[in-house]
Amino acid sequence: MGTQDSDGTGGEQTARRRVWAWYFFDWANQPYNTLLLTFIFAPYFANAVAPDPVTGQALWGTMLAVTGTVIALMAPVLGAVADSAGPRRPWLWLFSALYVGGACALWWAVPGAEGVLWILLAFGIGMVGLEFGIIFTNAYLPELARGPEIGRVSGTGWALGYAGGVVSLAIMLAFLAETESGRTLLGLPPAFGLDPALREGTRAVGPFTALWYVLFAAPLFLWLRDPVRPPAPRGALARGLADLWATLSGLPRRPSLLAYLGSSMFYRDALNGVYAFGGIYAAGVLGWSVVQIGVFGISAAVVGALACWAGGLADRAFGPKPVIAAGILVLIGVCLVVVTTSREMVLLIPVAPGSGLPDAAFYLCGGLIGAAGGTLQAASRTMMVRQADPARMTEAFGLYALSGKATSFLAPALVALATALTGDQRLGVAPLILLFLLGLGLLWFVKADGERADTWAASSPSSLSS
């Protein structure tokens, strides 16, 4: 029987509740990626708010590049300060407010809106809140499990995140997002009397995403407490920045960590490009409606949820490195299919007018993106735990965010540039292949257990393994 905590609950029960609170955060924040970044709002913005789809894709890419730069500059600083200056929860409250406020503001993205820049700014603010919140919650991971068991917990969390994306997307398509007929996928008028002529059902995706987060992030704040720490001493800010500088300047002496940060910098940037432009591509090249893109998103997320759970087990059995490598290879294949597929051809082979083969190929790509992308990201945060200094875990995930955002301008900028130069959305996706290849090459130099392999091997599995 577990020891009793101060609140009278068993220690094991409290530990499991903490894990589930952490899982709920993945469930709560996923709609920003699923509904806003990929399947509902992004294609709506490019095709209904922006002047035309090509301009919309270029504007969207520019916004993501700017947002990514802000995150890259701030993430490691915030992580270092948090490790030196007390609890994480106040930071999570702040970033949650940015998430909710940015999402809610997207309601004003009316078709043909003149204030396009304000809409992009609101999305960027919410994105900053999402990314910074993830940094601080990821830092809890080594406190929830130990050794190889971290891979299972990370994979399960990502699987539940995908499940949250599926459920939220299904609700949007069934009751809110309107088709060309003005009705939802179930043939119903948009709920709450929303006007389909003004696209209010689709625009409701912003407030809906915010409400979802408020409801399902609550367990994180109720159940997942910070470890007891002494009050932050005076000068904690300066000490945190000094520790960050020491970590950065010491990276050349930690070649495995340096190689991993570089590898993840490229492959996660490419993956974010796939997520950001997949829906826009389907709308502009294949002519899909918001509802078709949503169904595509549901199928991808269902496959992704199952794959993340299985990937977590593979991570626990074989370690994160082979899981990451396999995910990158699959995504390279997906990008090759996308670049060589349009309404007139599949893999550069012409198809008959009206053929459903391009749609089938893209649905297959969606399932592979969901499966490979989810397992890749879950294994990536497990790998970061293996490479990091346990005493500086929030700082480590700040560096991890930096590696994911240091070149975050690159994928959207390259896509925007290639799209603008060629005038072809299909060819605009091609630069992502190079980024995946760079990430795969650097992964070769990463040690599976980092520079602290002996310490890692000696750690015992968590009691949460059941």
Image (spheres, helix red, strand yellow):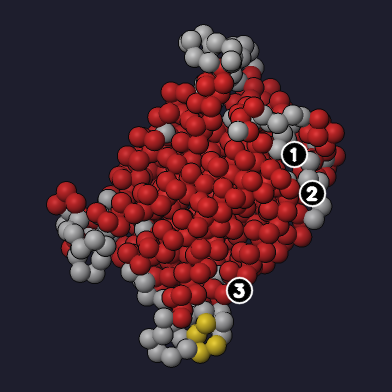
Q: Earlier in the sequence, mark 2 or mark 3?
A: 3
Q: Are marks 3 and 1 in contact (CB under 8 Å)?
A: no
**Residue 236, located in which quarter of the rendered image?**
top right
> Which residue in the rendered view is the most extreme toward the front?
1
**Residue 226, located in which quarter of the rendered image?**
top right
Task: Tally the numbered discs.
Answer: 3
| Nearer to the camera, 443 or 319 | 319
Residue 275, percent from left and from top: 50, 59
Residue 369, percent from left and from top: 54, 61
According to the picture, the residue beneath numbered tag 2 turns out to be: 446
Quarter of the image containing the N terminus?
A: top right
> In the shown orientation, is residue 186 left or right of residue 380?
left
Q: Residues within 10 Å of mark 2 (few under 14, many from 20)?
A: many
The amino acid type, in three-letter code, at marker 3 is Leu
> In the shown orientation, is residue 249 left or right of residue 105?
right
According to the picture, the residue beneath numbered tag 3 turns out to be: 336
Q: Earlier in the sequence, mark 1 or mark 2?
A: 1
**Residue 415, located in which quarter of the rendered image?**
bottom right
Q: CA distance from mark 1 to mark 2?
A: 9 Å
Report whether residue 341 is seen: yes
> In the shown orientation, is residue 106 left or right of residue 257?
left
> Which residue is at 62% across, 50% downward?
311
| Nearer to the camera, 116 or 151 | 151
Residue 36 is marked as none
Classify mark 3: helix, strand or loop: helix
Vertical relation: 394 (above or below) 185: above
The amino acid type, in three-letter code, at marker 1 is Gln
Classify mark 2: helix, strand or loop: loop
According to the picture, the residue beneath numbered tag 1 turns out to be: 387
